[in-house]
Amino acid sequence: MHTLNIGILAHVDAGKTSLTERLLFDHGAVDRLGSVDAGDTVTDDGGIERRRGITVRSAVAGFTVGDTRVNLIDTPGHSDFVAEVERALEVLDGAVLLLSAVEGVQARTRVLMRTLRRLRLPTLVFVNKIDRAGARTDGLLDDVRRLLTPHVAPLTEVSDAGSAQARVAPRPPDGRLAEALAEVDPDVLAALVDGPEPTARDLAAALAARTADGSFHPLFHGSALGGQGVAELVEGLVTLVPAAAGGTAAGSPEPRGTVFAVRPGPAGERRAYLRLYAGEVRPRRRLTFLRRESDGRTTEVSGRVTRLDVVGGDATLTAGNIAAVTVPGGLRVGDRLGEPADRAPRFAPPTLQTLVRARRPEQAGPLRSALLALADRDPLLHARPAASGTTTLLLYGEVQMEVLAATLAEEFGIEAEFAPGRVRLLERPAGTGEAAEEMPWLDRTRYWATIGLRVGPGPYGSGAVFGYETELGALPRAFHQAVEETVHAALTAGLTGAAVTDCRVTLIRSGFNSVLSTAADFRGLTPIVLRRALARAGTVLYEPYLTFEAEVPPDALAAVTGLLASLGADITGTAGGEPAWFVTGELPARRAREAELRLPGLTRGEAVWSSRPGADRPVKPGR
């Protein structure tokens, strides 16, 4: 049995969940066809997903066709859940990029295709909703070649598009496919130029090879609701996408894998979806996962597998497959079993910051606990206590905020209010500074501790790293731990109040009184010494930027570039002509919403805007 892990990706409302339901139903994995409108689909099983009709969290379901097991990963379409999508990409063998034959190529579709092509992930394009009024085929294919990739060719053709009588038929290999493949396959090009012309078998082999290496994209048509064209899509998946490697990797008997999604189980337990790359996992086996903390540290999480639900129903999780795993203490997204060498995309942290408050004062404590529990499931959802019983939260957008409010009410019974979101700022050390205090240290409280700290800049993206220059064993372990934990806690608010990151804090001096000193002394004195060292080092305040692409009509190019420049954008390129120009660059995240709102008025509603988190930059004077 071969295994394929396939992601279904699309702009919101293009039909991802409906296609998943159709695939499961047609291959006997479910006995009835669920509906997004009715809220009874297999993968959107959360109450919020069913009410809103959108996918919020990645989900896995599987079916079997011949000797191939296909695991489907249904991912969110809304841009607020971009991290959920990018985490899923890490574990895929291939992808289906869904387009609507009515709405066509949308902004989110273009962002997804760029990511898929960058990862060289085998990707099939599926044009959905061919039976809907207004469906297009030939014109849409031109848009795909212009806006997504020129390296695409249809393997099906449609009759009566835009009506309930729409039907799909396979398109035999012909000269048009050969010409398209010749752009990416030198053997096909040589055969067309020098002869003899490639046979149907030659074209099939070239199609499989170029699809496998991610340079070419077969296109299929169909309807997820009506079922037309789905069989041809499945045939394309099993013949064109290489299956996952199975068995135990040579020389690597230990299991190796990654956790890409976490969802609550029926009893409230945390179920982690684990993709295994090598080895095998059985129930009751003890596993050790590596976890990268938000401050840059790597910690270990160990425990026995108390529950193992392999997609497909096997008793043992083998290489190439996926299982929902339960381990005491719980796993997080991004936890790694062993050291996977497979692609591991890094994505920017959230850029929107908000304060969350319980509507009823007596729920302030439970609210904070609930938000910390939700953040523990998702390492990119940062939560930390703030003043007056509020909690500071980092997230990606307003829709995610609405979903979190509904989750708090549904899962925890807490009504929460979210302050308007504002862009998150960060501090980084400008230089190196040192400070030290001897015991006893007198403020309003006597601290029986000696602490010296050095603060300096660290590599970009390293977070906050703590180290020692003092002699090992000079302090009891509890005092060492108190200093380290307090340093990480204190760095959540630097000289301007923003969190401090990409720094290295070193303990350079220490001392204690064996009779009087306690861990509380070190916890009390550490923030004072750290702040003095940070002040001597100095900090630079940074703000997040977005990398954007705007597609605009030629007659609006000057107005659009003028607008973007006035918003502080750095325009890195303009290219195109008729029928559109493409403007690329970087823009402060705090000005992105204004750009999105003003573009339609400058372009008669014809602009297409897409953006993704980029690197942050120092805040300009006079911001």
Image (tube, rainbow, N blue to C red):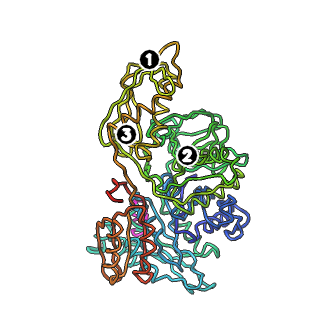
> Residue at coordinates 70% horizontally, 55% vertically from top-left?
410
Between marks 2 and 3 in the image, the one whose residue lies nearer the viewer: 2
Residue type, mark 1 in image = Gly
- In whole angstroms, how far apart are the C-alphas of marks 3 and 1? 25 Å
Residue type, mark 2 in image = Ala
Q: Position of residue 488 (x, y in %)?
A: 47, 36
Rendered image quadrant of residue 302: top right
Q: Position of residue 418 (x, y in %)?
A: 59, 57
Q: Position of residue 607 (x, y in %)?
A: 42, 77
3 or 1: tag closer to the N-terminus? 1
Element at label 1: loop
Residue, disc 3: 503
Q: Position of residue 409 (x, y in %)?
A: 69, 55
Q: Which residues are magenta?
A: 202-213
Query: Of the numbered discs in the image, which one, if any, rests on residue 386?
Result: 2
- In whole angstroms, how far apart are the C-alphas of marks 2 and 3? 23 Å
Q: Is residue 606 above or below residue 376?
A: below
Which of the two residues, 125 or 298, is positioned nearer the viewer here? 298
**Which residue in the rendered view is the most extreme toward the top?**
515
Residue type, mark 3 in image = Cys
Query: Of the numbered discs in the image, which one, if any, rests on residue 473?
Result: 1
| Total residue callouts | 3
